């Protein structure tokens, strides 16, 4: 029983689960972490793919960035419409089923499951890769660290977002703060005439 309580936390009745809510600050950080995680590694992967095509392909960086910004705007507008239409909550399955039919709802649910699985795999791999690049001595343990990170994320989700909201929210706000600091320092160095250094590395 103690092990079960440790893994899953205190049990909640069905009536109480309906009243469990997260504050806006917590909910924003938790449910935007998927998009934020893409910011951490998506740019590098885009540049890596363009690098294969040659240096001339880097001219597509700005159009691709603008297309991504447009996509984010469309997704944000869609979320806003969904929140307005379903003030009591409505996920992709419920919205698609009600407006497009049962098959569309199942398709949306299946797409979400695939997306969640791939997000965990890619995000954890990218995070461990960043960690091992900063601490090369951890490279031999990259797989073990990835598995450990997935187990921790799984355990926190089993405990429930209400109990672990602070743990999930903290990295999101720290990441946003670091991004602002990075942009500020970069602009400050650029405006004050600091020369940009291009790191030399071997590409495989």
Image (cartoon, rainbow, N blue to C red):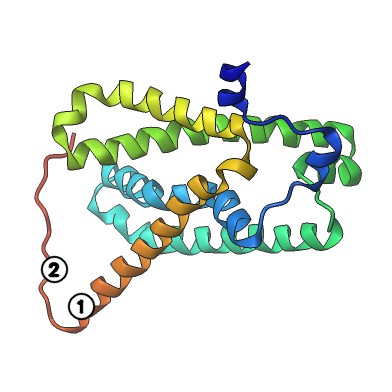
Q: Which quadrant holds residue 203?
A: top left
Task: Please name the residue that numbered disc 2 is placed on.
Answer: 196
Disc 1 from disc 2: Cα separation: 8 Å
Task: State which quarter of the image contains the N terminus.
Answer: top right
Task: State which quarter of the image contains the C terminus.
Answer: top left
List x then y, in percent, for residue 135: 17, 38
Most foreground residue, 173 or 101: 173
Residue at left 56%, top 17%?
A: 3
- Whether residues under marks 1 and 2 lie with C-beta atoms below 8 angstroms apart, the answer is yes
In the rendered view, would you say 168 is above or below 148? Answer: below
Left or right of 56? Residue 175 is right
Kindly state the secondary structure of the residue where label 1 is placed.
helix
- Number of numbered discs: 2
Left or right of 143? Residue 197 is left
Residue at left 30%, top 44%?
A: 48
Task: Please name the residue that numbered disc 1 is placed on.
Answer: 190
Q: Which quadrant holds residue 141?
A: top left
Kindly state the secondary structure of the residue where label 2 is placed.
loop
Are there few (<14), some (14-19), or many (20+) residues within 10 Å of tag 1? few
Most foreground residue, 35 or 149: 149
Left or right of 204? Residue 104 is right
- Earlier residue among tags 1 and 2: 1
Q: Which label was assigned to residue 107?
A: none
List x then y, in percent, for residue 79: 71, 58
Are there few (<14), some (14-19), or many (20+) residues within 10 Å of tag 2? few
List x then y, in percent, for residue 163: 60, 42
Left or right of 175? Residue 84 is right
């Amino acid at each position: 029983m103690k092990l079960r309580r440790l893994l899953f936390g205190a049990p909640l009745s069905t009536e109480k689960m309906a009243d469990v809510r997260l504050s806006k600050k917590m909910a924003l950080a938790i449910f935007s972490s998927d998009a934020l995680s893409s910011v951490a590694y998506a740019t590098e992967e885009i540049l890596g793919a363009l690098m294969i095509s040659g240096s001339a392909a880097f001219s597509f960086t700005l159009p691709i960035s603008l297309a991504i910004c447009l996509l984010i705007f469309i997704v944000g507008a869609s979320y806003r419409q969904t929140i307005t239409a379903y003030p009591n909550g409505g996920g992709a399955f419920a919205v698609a089923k009600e407006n497009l039919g049962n098959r569309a709802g199942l398709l949306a649910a299946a797409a979400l499951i695939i997306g969640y699985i791939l997000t965990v795999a890619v995000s954890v791999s990218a995070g461990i890769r960043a960690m091992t690049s900063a601490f090369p001595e951890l490279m031999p343990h990259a797989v073990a660290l990835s598995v450990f990170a997935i187990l921790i994320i799984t355990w926190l989700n089993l405990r429930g977002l209400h109990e672990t909201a602070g743990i999930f929210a903290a990295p999101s706000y720290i990441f946003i703060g670091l991004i602002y600091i990075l942009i500020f320092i970069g602009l400050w160095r650029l405006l004050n005439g600091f020369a940009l250094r291009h790191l030399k590395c071997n590409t495989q």
